[in-house]
Amino acid sequence: MTAKDIFMKTLPFCWSKLGLGLLNIVICVVLFAILMGIALLFNSEGVAAVMIIVWFVLIGIVNFVINHYFAYLVKAGHVAVIAQTFKDGRVPDNCVSVGKAMVKDRFGTANAYFAIDKLVSGAVKQLQRTLGRITDSLLGSLPGADSVKSATNFFLNISLGYIDECCLSYTFYNRGQNAYKSACDGVVIYAQNWKHLLKNAAMTALTVIVSILVVTLVAFVLFGGAFRLLGWSGFVAFVLAVMLAWTIKFAFIDSWMMVKMMHGYMQVAPSTVITYDLYTQLSGLSSSFKRLFNESRVTPETVTVAEPASEPLAESESAPTPAPAEESVKPRFCSECGTPLKAGMAFCGNCGKKVG
């Protein structure tokens, strides 16, 4: 399926995102009307100024609640359904409900999703800064090099906002291991294919910028005209116009860019042979990736994999006596921390050391 096909068949997610954004704007307008009504009762510019500050605080709280407890399910559900589409070759019926169920099944709570999302986003940005320094060193002190570097980094930063969704999509594509481990693999896949994935970074960034400017301008004309008739603040009209533009960006522009990026990512992810020695290298380059990797080693697997030991063996303790087995099968222990190893394990479940 093409990126356009997937986008059109997952439009219900876009409408859901738009609905949440418009709900946010309606709540903000109602709060503004109430607070300005209170200010009119006192007939004081000082009280009006305080009410404006209170309004900004309240809309920040409303934004946090909507994004943290509702929008994440829709956005992550969209990612989950796209990943499943590449795996199965079709978009499931009632995709929004299916996507939400997949997210709850994979992550459980909003906090778990945001924890992994934050680590993945941080890892991608830190790794890209390292790769960017390598690219900058190639330009050296050529005339105009600084301008080229700045423009390149600007476009890359916008495009990187969609790469973390690509890495997270791998947690749904590969459900045979814990979410942290799949997210680690997703970042490694990006690190091995970053040139291919970011080759259209400039066009992606320009599309996002132009779209936001156009939508903001149109929204400001509409809100500005309405507020002028009512005698309300033009600044507040501008704030609401930006909120509407951001809602449309979140609902449609970001969704389209995410689908395009994920389409390119999923073209290379299944066939990429993950280089496991990159885990150590990337951990040294990115503190976020190191934390993600450490979490992947202590989080229980979702399939039949040995559970990590709760504590390493103390020096004074003798190794536990293995269960009776055939004489040909000898018990094995990790050479790094002493944790008992089960047959077939490639890595220690406690410290992550590769089994010799």
Image: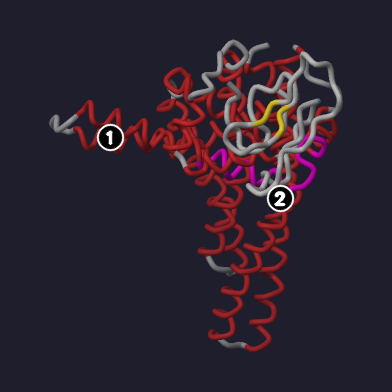
Residue at (62% x, 67% y) in the render? 230
Residue 335 position within the rendered picture, expressed as x and y whole percent measured from the top left = 59, 32
Mark 1 is on which residue type?
Lys
Mark in the foreground, 2 or 1: 2
Side of 163 relative to 307 (left or right): left
In-front residue for pair 188/345:
345
Side of 107 relative to 351 (left or right): right
Residue 318 position within the rendered picture, expressed as x and y whole percent measured from the top left = 71, 42
Side of 88 relative to 242 (left or right): right
* Circle on res. 149: 1
Q: Is residue 15 visible?
A: no
Let me know if residue 120 is in the magenta part: yes
Residue 133 position within the rendered picture, expressed as x and y whole percent measured from the top left = 30, 34
Which type of secondary structure does the marked residue at label 2 adopt? helix
Quarter of the picture containing the C terminus is top right
Using a 10 Å C-alpha cutoff, classify the residue at mark 1 as few (fewer than 14 neighbours), some (14 to 19) or many (20 or more): some
Q: Which residue is mark 2?
A: 111
Quarter of the picture containing the N terminus is top right
